[in-house]
Image (cartoon, rainbow, N blue to C red):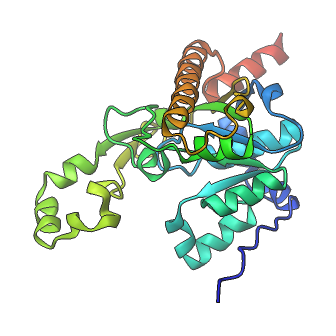
Amino acid sequence: MPAPPEDLSFDPRTIEELDSLVQPLKRLLSPVSLGVEHIPREGAVLLTGNHTIYGLLDIPMLGLEVWEKTGRAVRGLGDHNHFALPVWRDLLRRIGAVRGTREVCGRLFEAGEAVLVFPGGGREVMKHKHERYRLIWKERIGFARLAIQFGVPIVPFASVGVEDMFEIVVDADDVLRSPVGDLLRALGVDEMPWFRHGEIIPPIARGKGLGPLPRLERQYFLFGEPIETAPLAGLHEDREACMELRERVAGAIQSQIGQLLELQEGDPERYPVQRLLRRISSRLG
């Protein structure tokens, strides 16, 4: 007997609860969102962007910014491993996240939802040294295939800020070159499909702030012009067409990351202390 379809119901009011909960952090990170006018105010859309290290700060800040600026709740596609953890999966579902399967994504598109996907997935979260703000998508084209199949526009977005808060001290490559890596190979763990050549090994990072604390960096988001998929109708099974669309999206995101890094470099209010001093100065003046 087939399993019943997954419950995708979601109460957007939980976003307001989350917003209240993270207000102190939001004030410290002072997010800046550009290009939000490119997000359609209704109808199915796929928001596609870069994942940042650990993946814990970019998602809530991004979702809250979209909600505040457009009134749309973003439904994030999560890795299957997240939904294997009882308490964690309940929290994710409460804030609108869903299991990232074709069936689930298709149902959301049919319902006219705004869907969020990070094609780099877990590998992009488990950053290695010298991979700051890099897209690590390998050969993944699933998001492009689904967008073409359902005729959904893709809005590329970039996220900058989180990866300036940390410095990676030990990454998966270091672990695999260590005695721990020798042990994993001796036990045959490296041959397990879920191991993915060390891709599930999280980096060990230290904060760039005071002591071990992360440096409080402003968060920047840039949404690009929608990339229409209607001209590719019927080509969702054509790998070349999907790959071309994927590369077009990736190129847009990488360009937007560059724009945000330039903006960040010249931002006189990049850090909380700078913002505080400017406010004090404006009041005294």
Name the residue: 81% across, 15% down: 282
Give the vertical position of 194 relative to 109 (above or below). Answer: below
Residue 131 location in percent, x, y?
A: 37, 34
Give the vertical position of 216 relative to 32 (above or below). Answer: below
Name the residue: 10% across, 62% down: 182
Residue 228 location in percent, x, y?
A: 72, 29
Q: Nearer the viewer, residue 152 or 78?
A: 152
Q: Is residue 232 left or right of residue 71?
A: left
Give the vertical position of 77 relative to 220 (above or below). Answer: below
Q: Is residue 249 left or right of residue 222?
A: left
Query: In the rendered picture of this protein, how many numbered marks are placed on residues?
Result: 0
Q: Can you say which quadrant of the picture contains the C terminus?
A: top right
Name the residue: 64% across, 15% down: 268
Residue 172 location in percent, x, y?
A: 27, 50
Q: Nearer the viewer, residue 87 or 213?
A: 87
Residue 4 location in percent, x, y?
A: 71, 81
- Residue 215 appearing in the image: no
Which quadrant of the figure has residue 9? bottom right
Q: Nearer the viewer, residue 232 or 186?
A: 232
Q: Can you say which quadrant of the picture contains the N terminus?
A: bottom right
Q: Is residue 133 left or right of residue 278?
A: left
- Residue 231 appearing in the image: yes
Name the residue: 72% across, 75% down: 5
